[in-house]
Image (spheres, rainbow, N blue to C red):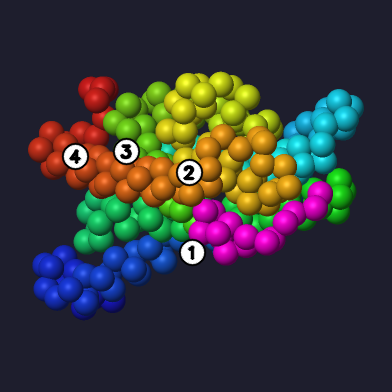
């Protein structure tokens, strides 16, 4: 381990630097995957509560005699809420909480980059959250009889991966921004939680918001990712799709690149501030 640290710190050799980067990702992903399952009550409530909200919308659509595809639309949206909550609370506000806990100093002093540490958090959070999302999908299938089409499963998998890359890239950017804004991180997470359910169309087709509102909401990766996955899972009723799947995937790729590059610059700015001014937030407290 000391050899990897020494060579990674001095930049001697691409292989050693890449090894340190990958080991940092694994080191930060591990506690998220393992630690999240140590408190069994968290697994229960993180799965049950989104399912209850989903069930309410299912019964609402059934009372309106809506097509069965809308029931599936709600179930998929309910599953994706788990990812948005994970990005808000376990990514965006994470560095601020680590600063209060004293861990952020260790991150900055470590020879590994903050980018690798945040990527590890993202990978661990993604794996942890996927188990909850799958549980909601399975529950929706068993309880409400939702029929999913897997005809385009390959394109569906590609869409999901690209959506998650863009979404967690945004979470990495927010982690730096929330830290710079200090105590407002908690309030920002609360502020962004419920409105995004509306703006991204978690429980209804986003095109119902109108073209310009839906276009603005498309800056959030989940908006287009969710819309594209719904079109692929329920191809028999494509009328609720906002844009074509190919176009939505293209926009998601652009968003992913933009958010990942922006997060890299934000982290570098934060590190320079720490070295030059001895502080990380915009407030002097």
Residue at (60%, 48%) from the top-left corner? Answer: 229
Asked if the residues shown at circle 3 and circle 4 are in contact, with their CB atoms under 8 angstroms apart, the answer is yes
Location of mark 4 (residue): 269
Q: CA distance from mark 3 to mark 4?
A: 9 Å
Task: Tell me residue 255's x, y (percent).
Answer: 37, 43
Residue at (82%, 36%) from the top-left corner? Answer: 67
Which stretch did the figure color magenta? 146-160
> Which circle, 4 or 2, is nearer the viewer?
2
Q: CA distance from mark 1 to mark 3?
A: 22 Å
Is residue 222 rendered magenta in the image? Answer: no
Location of mark 2 (residue): 248
> Which circle, 1 or 3, is nearer the viewer?
3
Location of mark 3 (residue): 176
Q: Is residue 208 left or right of residue 12?
A: right
Count every numbered label the image shows and give the total: 4
Location of mark 1 (residue): 30
Q: Which quadrant would residue 101 be assigned to in this image?
A: top left
Asked if the residues shown at circle 4 and circle 1 are in contact, with their CB atoms under 8 angstroms apart, the answer is no
Mark 4 vs 1, N-terminal side: 1
Figure quadrant of the N terminus: bottom left
């Amino acid at each position: 381990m000391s050899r990897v640290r020494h060579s990674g710190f001095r930049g001697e050799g691409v292989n050693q630097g890449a090894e340190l980067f990958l080991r940092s990702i694994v080191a930060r992903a591990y506690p998220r995957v393992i630690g999240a399952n140590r408190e069994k009550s968290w697994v229960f409530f993180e799965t049950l509560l989104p399912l209850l909200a989903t069930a309410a919308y299912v019964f609402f659509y059934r009372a309106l005699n809506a097509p069965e595809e809308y029931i599936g639309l709600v179930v998929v949206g309910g599953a994706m809420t788990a990812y948005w909550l994970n990005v808000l609370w376990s990514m965006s506000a994470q560095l601020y909480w680590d600063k209060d806990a004293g861990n952020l100093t260790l991150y900055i002093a470590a020879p590994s980059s903050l980018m690798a540490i945040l990527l590890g958090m993202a990978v661990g959070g993604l794996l942890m959250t996927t188990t909850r999302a799958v549980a909601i999908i399975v529950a929706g299938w068993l309880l409400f009889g939702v029929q999913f089409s897997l005809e385009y499963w390959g394109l569906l998998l590609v869409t999901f991966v690209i959506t998650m890359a863009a979404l967690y890239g945004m979470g990495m950017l927010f982690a730096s921004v929330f830290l710079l804004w200090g105590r407002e991180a908690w309030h920002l997470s609360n502020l962004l939680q419920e409105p995004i359910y509306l703006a991204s169309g978690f429980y209804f087709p986003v095109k119902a918001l109108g073209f310009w509102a839906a276009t603005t909401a498309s800056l959030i990766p989940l908006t287009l990712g969710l819309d594209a996955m719904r079109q692929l899972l329920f191809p028999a009723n494509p009328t609720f799709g906002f844009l074509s799947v190919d176009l939505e995937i293209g926009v998601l790729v652009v968003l992913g690149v933009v958010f990942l590059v922006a997060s890299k610059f934000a982290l570098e700015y934060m590190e320079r501030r720490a070295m030059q001014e001895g502080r990380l937030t915009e407030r002097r407290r």
